[in-house]
Amino acid sequence: MELNFQNKVVLVTGAAGGIGSCLIEEFTRTGARIYGTDIIAGPSENYFQGDITDVTFLRSMVERIINMEGGIDVLVNSAGICLRTPLKDITRKEWELLMDINLTSVFLLTQLVVENMKTQGSGTIVSLASVAGKVGGIIAGTHYAVSKAGIECFTKSAAKIYAPYGITVNAVAPGIIDTSMQDDVPADQMSSVLRSIPMQRAGTAKEVAATVMFLASGLASYITGQTICVNGGNYM
Ligand SMILES: NC(=O)c1ccc[n+]([C@@H]2O[C@H](COP(=O)([O-])OP(=O)(O)OC[C@H]3O[C@@H](n4cnc5c(N)ncnc54)[C@H](O)[C@@H]3O)[C@@H](O)[C@H]2O)c1
């Protein structure tokens, strides 16, 4: 048994980020026809630069990929922002921006790709949740934690609705992963968080990508509605 995405059409959001760019590399290595999107310029040839909160952009990107490839087999929702504003200081505007980027984008893109997946009779959606969504945040803001808990519930709901069509919907909940998302955490605070993790270290983008790719592959054909933790034992 091995991971094989030969001729599978894969769309990854947040493709310029630490986890997203690793996914682009690994999916490409395993034969996928890979497409990436991010608000900033990215590493892939088949790349759509745009804002994940802009539904017109999302619709035209999905239509273009389906026109070129005939369908989309795998959607990975990795775009996200992590804000750490204390609850008392979060404005409605900031709350809505974070929800739009982290959670509403998952809903919109699922809606946009799923009709084609239903016609194909197959498809896989994997979204990046977080340990923050399970415990209410460790070093992230309330809005971030809520958006990630929302992804878990969205995942279960969509999994139930689309299972009869051969579509699986799952999530991966990383703990502390060594990407630029954690760059703003003061070093002393990060050291104490890392000491509290049973494995005493941050995870790597590759360790998250491996779980995303397993869930997106035929190896996980009987797994749906699940959120798999990748956290060094940080949350059990
Ligand atoms: N790094 C961690 O410790 C960690 C832990 C738990 C969950 N996650 C989740 O994993 C996912 C990937 O995180 P990462 O570590 O690669 O972070 P990252 O910051 O390296 O990547 C996130 C990407 O999302 C993109 N993005 C942000 N706003 C956007 C917008 N409006 N439109 C389009 N793209 C936008 C960014 O440009 C960036 O490239 C995120 O959803 C994050 O919440 C990360």
Image (tube, rainbow, N blue to C red):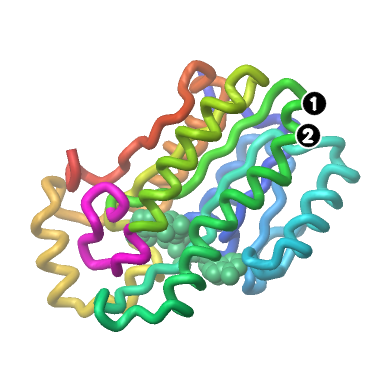
Mark 2 and ligand 1: say if the CB distance to the nearest ligand atom is below 8 Å: no
Q: Is residue 92 left or right of residue 119?
A: left
Is residue 140 in the magenta section?
A: yes
Counting from the top left corner in percent of width and height, residue 220 is at: 49, 22
Residue at point 29% right, 65% down? 142
Dot 2, how many residues are within 10 Å of its Cα: few (below 14), some (14-19), or many (20+)? some
Q: Residue furthest right?
A: 67
Residue 17 visible (yes or no) = no
Residues at marks 2 and 1, CA–CA distance in whole angstroms: 5 Å
Residue at point 78% right, 34% down? 116
Counting from the top left corner in percent of width and height, residue 211 is at: 42, 37
Which portion, as a residue range, is magenta?
A: 132-145
Is residue 99 in the magenta section?
A: no
What residue is pinned by disc 1?
119
The quarter in which the C terminus is drawn is top left
Counting from the top left corner in percent of width and height, residue 124 is at: 60, 32
Counting from the top left corner in percent of width and height, residue 213 is at: 51, 36
Q: Residue 98 shows which numbered tag? A: none
In the depicted structure, whether residue 162 falls above or below residue 31: above
As helix, strand or loop, the secondary structure at mark 2 comes to: helix
Q: Are marks 2 and 1 in contact (CB under 8 Å)?
A: yes
Residue at point 84% right, 43% down? 66
- Amino acid residing under circle 2: Asn
In the depicted structure, whether residue 236 falls above or below residue 199: above
Q: Is residue 52 left or right of residue 199?
A: right
Mark 1 and ligand 1: say if the CB distance to the nearest ligand atom is below 8 Å: no
* The quadrant where residue 4 appears: top right
In the depicted structure, whether residue 61 falls above or below residue 127: below
What residue is pinned by disc 2?
116
Residue at point 20% right, 55% down? 201
Residue 108 visible (yes or no) = yes
